[in-house]
Image (cartoon, rainbow, N blue to C red):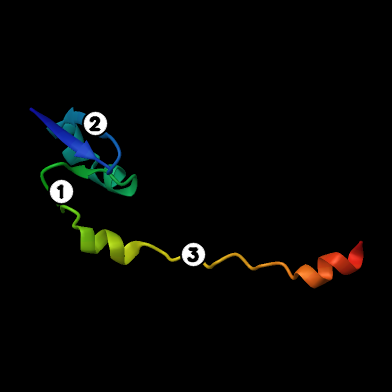
Amino acid sequence: MDIKLTNGRKIIIKDKKYYEVNKGHFERNGFFPLDNVKKEIKKATVKDISDKVVQLKPKRKKNAKRTKKKD
């Protein structure tokens, strides 16, 4: 019997007996059974997206008098 393990990025398949013996090794490396990891998919709304938008500061205008003095 096989068990699927994941660390969030990749999924590996190992024998259940091998996993039980080396459980500490897998947990140290960040692998947990796929059944224990719950995937929550949240649909984004327009309000959620608009809250995260950062307003940019307007560019600072150069002083026309200073640029004329240099010439």
Q: Given this view, does label 2 or label 1 mark the residue nearer the observer?
A: 1
Residue type for callout 2: Ile
Q: Given this view, does label 3 or label 2 mark the residue nearer the observer?
A: 3
Circle 2 crowding by C-alpha within 10 Å: few under 14, some 14–19, many from 20: few
Instruction: Give above or below for 48 relative to 35.
Output: below
Kindly identify the residue that appears in the image at 30 percent across and 47 percent down: 30
Residue, far left: 1
Residue type for callout 3: Leu
Q: Distance between the residues labelled 2 and 1?
A: 17 Å
Q: Element at badge 3?
A: loop
Residue 69: x %, y % from top left? 89, 69
Upstream in sequence: badge 1 or badge 3: 1
- Between 1 and 34, which is closer to the camera in this rendering? 34
Q: Name the residue under label 2.
A: 12
Q: In this rendering, would 56 be left or right of 11?
A: right
Q: Given this view, does label 1 or label 3 mark the residue nearer the observer?
A: 3
Q: How far apart are marks 3 and 2 (CA)?
A: 44 Å
Q: Element at badge 1?
A: loop
Q: Mark 1 points at which residue?
A: 39
Q: Mark 3 points at which residue?
A: 56
- Between 43 and 30, which is closer to the camera in this rendering? 43
Q: In this rendering, would 63 be left or right of 61?
A: right
Instruction: Give above or below for 3 relative to 8.
Output: above
Upstream in sequence: badge 3 or badge 2: 2
Kindly identify the residue that appears in the image at 18 percent across and 57 percent down: 45
Q: In this rendering, would 49 be left or right of 19?
A: right
Q: Element at badge 2?
A: strand
Kindly identify the residue that appears in the image at 15 percent across and 48 percent down: 39
Residue 56: x %, y % from top left? 49, 64
Upstream in sequence: badge 2 or badge 1: 2
